[in-house]
Amino acid sequence: MPILDVEFVLGPGEKLPAGLAAAVAFEAGLVFGTPAGGTWVKLYELSAEHYAENDSQADSKPVFVRVMRAHLPMQLELEQEAPKLAAAIARACGRPVESVHIIYQPPIGGRIAFGGELFNPSPPLPPPRPKR
């Protein structure tokens, strides 16, 4: 079950549209291949006044996505997933894909409790080794 914390830098007077969390959850769920209710999304707003890039006058409004999972996929899978996830979130929120930045958090299996119950699923099995 992926959990996404999505933080939007907003310009003056800009507000996140109603239904955006559901749209991001739907798009991300397609990327992850999760069943209904299997991808959770929390949205956060950050005023452009509280965001800066060093030595830049750019009017940047990035989207920062923190992805939490019980176990992380192998590096190759992450390399394939990241552009798909960035494109899906960009599509849902109407921002350019270049503005979507994904941060994969350390695995949360054994470190998170849902309703007080520690979630500690078995790690996925590694792919089989090719026969020689």
Image (cartoon, rainbow, N blue to C red):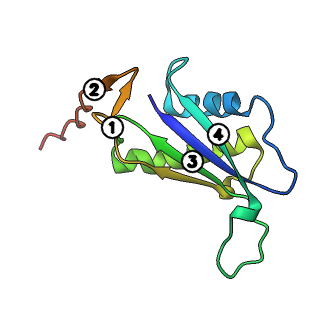
| Residue linked to disc 2 | 121
Element type where label 1 sits in the image: loop
Q: Which of marks 4 and 2 is in front?
A: 4
The extreme left residue here reads: 132
| Residue linked to disc 1 | 71
Give the Cα distance between marks 4 and 1.
Answer: 22 Å
Name which of mark 2 and mark 1 comes first in the sequence: 1
Name which of mark 3 and mark 1 comes first in the sequence: 3
Quadrant of the image for the C terminus? top left
Percent of width and height locating residue 7 = 63, 48
Q: Residue 21 appears in which quarter of the rendering?
A: top right
The extreme right residue here reads: 13
| Residue linked to disc 3 | 65
Name which of mark 2 and mark 3 comes first in the sequence: 3
Left or right of 105? Residue 7 is right
Residue contact at pointers 2 and 1, CB within 8 angstroms? yes
Name which of mark 4 and mark 1 comes first in the sequence: 4
**Which kind of residue does numbered mark 3 sit on?**
Val
**Which kind of residue does numbered mark 4 sit on?**
Leu
